[in-house]
Amino acid sequence: MSFTSTSLGATPLAPLRQDLGLIGLVGMAHSVSHFSQLLLPPLFPWLKEEFAVSYAELGFVLTVFFVVSCVVQALSGFWVDRFGPRPVLYAGLACIAAACAGYAASSSYWMLTFFAGVAGIGNGVFHPVDYTLLNNKVSPSRLGHAYSAHGITGTLGWAVAPLLMTGVTLAYSWRTALAVGGLVAVAVLVVLLFNHGRLAYTPVAAVKKAEGGSMDFLKEPAVWMCFAFFFMFAMVLGVVQAFAPGATRELHGVALATMALCLTIYMCGSAGGMVLGGFLIKDPMRCERVVAVGFAFAACVAVALALLPMPAWLVPVMFGLMGFASGTAGPSRDLLVKQSTPPGATGRVYGVVYGGLDVGQALTPLIFGLLMDHGQFRGVLLGLALVQALLIFSAFRVRSVGRRQPVAA
């Protein structure tokens, strides 16, 4: 059996209401994952003063979060395949809620760092859980839209966290803000518990028995090509979130308020692109071409921002176009991974593959931060375009390797 023969699985057509209910619950949980990633950064000015630390030391707190998340993401894939997604998902949400309570009660920098590790444990479970549920329970004809909704809810989590944390801190305190963040995770956990039956999924019986072959999927080149793809995708996201707005401010004289708007417009554009991307993968055999077109356009926008003179008002528009183009590639990106997944190993494969996101987000500041420190603002944007171009090559490599390799049964 080839990888592509399993591209849409054998899931029968389920009632629309049933699919929508599952997609909504999984999306709600996924939003908490992204929400947890941006709880602390908006509070850095307050945390810096509270604990008398530098921004570099606060950055280390985030590094701990993503390193722990990477390790747990790989491990949780095995737990999902063995015990099912529900208990793993509940544990992840509970860890995020506990971490928020710990953040709020922290009396030292190292206590804050410890609870960042706890939050990383919680964040690490979502992708193996989410894609196991979506790939195995959603009707194949609706899977593209499920991926779109999954990406959009994650983006909304990113958008809500800074607004909520900053707003509550200004009104009350940073400790209150983080406690409220914990209540968000608890509220989502309660909703999922009330919908326990919708999340039911029994792992493939053969996987439980074939313990000796549980690592065979690591021998598949397509799995590691997917890991490399997500590593580079995380670098793109990391540059856009942390450095690209600042680089364009230096190159095009963008005001501080407009610079902050660039990221918001990028995320909104990305969410819109994901909606379109859900329709573009009705033919699963063209998903790598959708990825190629999306990131090729995004790379052209990055090159234009680096090399062409333009008025400051046009810069946010360019970020919106770049976000929209990247967003259209999102559902096709997820389908590429599904097509490279051996039967019964969904959790493990997604755990390893999406670990590339955490590794990329942990390393990107080290590379592009140096470019910013040395005033290489064009280099930041050209580097962004280069990584986007590499994503195109990587997508075609994932598909070509997946077509050639047999599944490790």
Image: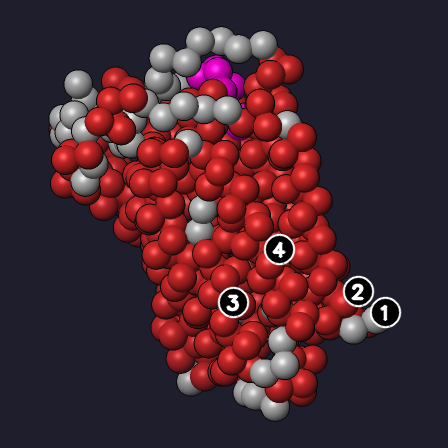
Numbered disc 1: secondary structure? helix
Instruction: For marks 2 and 1, give the CA distance.
Output: 6 Å
What residue is pinned by disc 4?
A: 97
Q: Identify the image quadrant of residue 245.
A: bottom right
- Residue 40 vs 235, above or below: the answer is below
The reply to whether residue 11 is visible in this rendering is yes
Query: Which of the 4 quarters of the picture holds residue 259?
Result: bottom right
Give the residue type that dot 1 points to: Ala
Residue at disc 2, secondary structure? helix
Q: CA distance from mark 2 to mark 4?
A: 20 Å
Classify mark 2: residues with Cα within 10 Å, few (<14), some (14-19) or many (20+).
some
Q: Nearer the viewer, mark 4 or mark 1?
A: 4
Q: Is residue 218 above or below residue 242?
A: above
Expressed as whole percent of the image width and height from the top left, the position of residue 36 reads: 58, 57
Q: Amino acid at mark 2?
A: Gly
Closer to the chain start, of discs 4 and 1, is 4
Residue that badge 2 annotates: 167
Q: Quadrant of residue 276?
A: top right
Q: Which residue is mark 3?
A: 116
Magenta part, dominant SS:
helix
Residue range highlighted in magenta = 138-146
